[in-house]
Amino acid sequence: MAIERTFSILKPDATRRNLTGAINALIEKAGLRIVAQKRVQITRAQAETFYAVHKERPFFGELVETMIGGPVVVQVLEGEDAIRKYRDVLGATDPSKAAPGTIRKEFALSVGENSAHGSDAPETAAIEIAQWFSGNEIVG
Ligand code: RTP
Ligand code: MG
């Protein structure tokens, strides 16, 4: 399996409850390396662009409001099979359906406040990483 990079966001519900370290511990325990990380306040325009794939969905407005409701931590994670592995560590979108030990089972409050995002494919990972980090901010 190739070494990959994926993009992660620790969402406002996680920063608000001071859970970024606890989530990072699960990320690192899974064998993923945090090769870039910064805390930012996302603008409305950035949130709308980031989740543009969902713009026709009924939850889009609520999703944007939630993502701009407080600071987030954006990250690049590196490791073997990183995209799939991080999706496994995140668990199901709905925390009530997430497996024990996953980030969303352990920490998420609801579908809307589900603590973290992970890219879903190599193409989206590349786009999302480039949207948030310049090359010299990523140190593998
Ligand atoms: P993410 O993109 O944040 O990693 O989450 P995901 O792939 O597991 O789920 P996705 O289908 O991409 O949905 C993006 C985010 O929208 C919110 N959502 N709300 N109310 C609802 O039915 C609903 N469905 C999705 C979630 O916060 C989800 O993470
Ligand atoms: Mg998604």
Image (tube, rainbow, N blue to C red):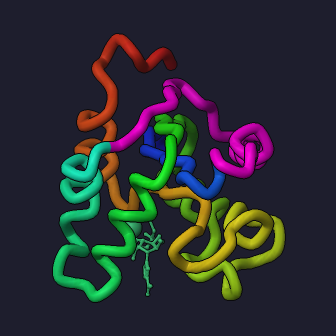
Give the quarter of the image for residue 49: bottom left
Coordinates of residue 60 in the picture (x, y in percent): 29, 76
Left or right, 52 with reference to 24 = left
Residue 1 seen:
no
Left or right, 59 with reference to 48 = right
Compared with residue 113, is residue 1 higher up or lower down, i.e. above or below?
above
At a point 66% along the width and 79% down the height, the residue shown is: 95
The quadrant of the picture showing ligand 1 is: bottom left
Q: Nearer the viewer, residue 84 or 112?
A: 112
At a point 59% along the width and 82% down the height, the residue shown is: 94
Coordinates of residue 74 in the picture (x, y in percent): 47, 38
Report if residue 32 lies within the magenta region: yes
Left or right, 87 with reference to 6 = right
Coordinates of residue 33 in the picture (x, y in percent): 62, 32
Compared with residue 118, is residue 60 higher up or lower down, i.e. above or below?
below
Give the quarter of the image for residue 129: top left
Report if residue 56 lies within the magenta region: no
Number of marks: 0
Q: Nearer the viewer, residue 29 or 25?
A: 25
Q: Which residues are magenta?
A: 15-42
Residue 51 seen:
yes
Q: Nearer the viewer, residue 4 or 112?
A: 112
At a point 24% along the width and 47% down the height, the residue shown is: 46
